[in-house]
Amino acid sequence: MQKRYSVDEKIADMVTQRVGLLADATRSPWQLQDSDIDLLKWAGALHEIGVAISQKNYSQHSAYLVLNTDLPGFAQQDQEIMATLIAGLKGRLRASLLDSVAKRKRESVARMIVLLRLAVILKHVEALEEIPDLSVCVDQQSLTLSYPESWGTDHPLTIWEIEQGADAMGQLGVSVQLKAN
């Protein structure tokens, strides 16, 4: 599907790697299952396919394509979850975003949206090794990214973008905070 829609594989790989690292850090406290993390990585790999239709609102186009394309190996429920993850990537979140998700999965999917949003923002950092002391601390309702103050000074747009998205992520029940060391 990436080839079909001319996705930049380097960016898709970066997002997939970053979402994997964030998921590993939150797996236990947020009780994410291996299947959740797999869907999260697939959503990261496919999040930009909608750019082939339009740069504007690409996440909505991507979500539509993931939901309505025959994807061998994926159950319809899996496609619905991936589409929901991708639809939640940009801007304000619609109140109905999680309506198609089974009630027992809504909390996990909301948390997964937060992880995917952060991974997409962090794709602009060429290598996570550029953040030598990045750490992720989580509890049931919050996620704190700690980073060296000097890194924050060198990457003000990344910090700004995370801060701007924190309100939307808060609507999902997760308070996202940044902490400079």
Image: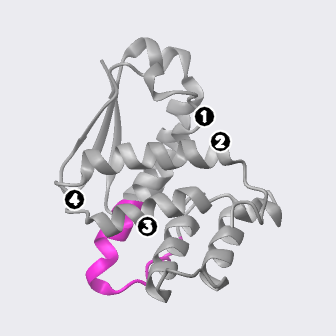
Image position, residue 91 (x, y; %): 60, 58
Calculate the distance from the C-alpha at mark 2 to the C-alpha at mark 1.
11 Å
Calculate the distance from the C-alpha at mark 4 to the C-alpha at mark 3.
15 Å
Q: Is residue 181 above or below residue 77?
A: above
Q: Quadrant of the C terminus?
A: top left
Classify residue 170 as left or right of residue 62.
left
Q: Which residue is mark 4?
A: 30
Q: Secondary structure at mark 3?
A: helix
> Can residue 10 be seen by looking at this rendering?
yes
> Can residue 100 be seen by looking at this rendering?
no
- Give me the residue at 37% from left, 66% from top: 110
Q: Quadrant of the N terminus?
A: bottom right
On residue 39, which mark appears? 3
Q: Which residue is mark 1?
A: 124
Which callout, 4 or 3, points at the residue further toward the start of the chain?
Answer: 4
First to last magenta residue range: 94-112
Classify residue 124 as left or right of residue 61.
left
Q: Looking at the picture, which amino acid does disc 1 mark?
A: His
Q: Looking at the picture, which amino acid does disc 4 mark?
A: Trp
On residue 138, which mark appears? none
Which callout, 1 or 4, points at the residue further toward the start of the chain?
Answer: 4
**Magenta stretch: residue 108 in it?**
yes
Calculate the distance from the C-alpha at mark 1 to the C-alpha at mark 3.
22 Å
Image position, residue 35 (x, y; %): 33, 69
Q: Which residue is mark 2?
A: 10
Which callout, 4 or 2, points at the residue further toward the start of the chain?
Answer: 2
For label 3, count other residues whose C-alpha is less than 10 Å away and answer few (under 14), some (14-19) or many (20+). Answer: some
The residue sitting at the right extreme is 53
> Which of the two discs, 4 and 2, sits closer to the camera?
2
For label 4, count other residues whose C-alpha is less than 10 Å away and answer few (under 14), some (14-19) or many (20+). Answer: some
Classify residue 97 as left or right of residue 171.
right
- Give me the residue at 43% from left, 67% from top: 39
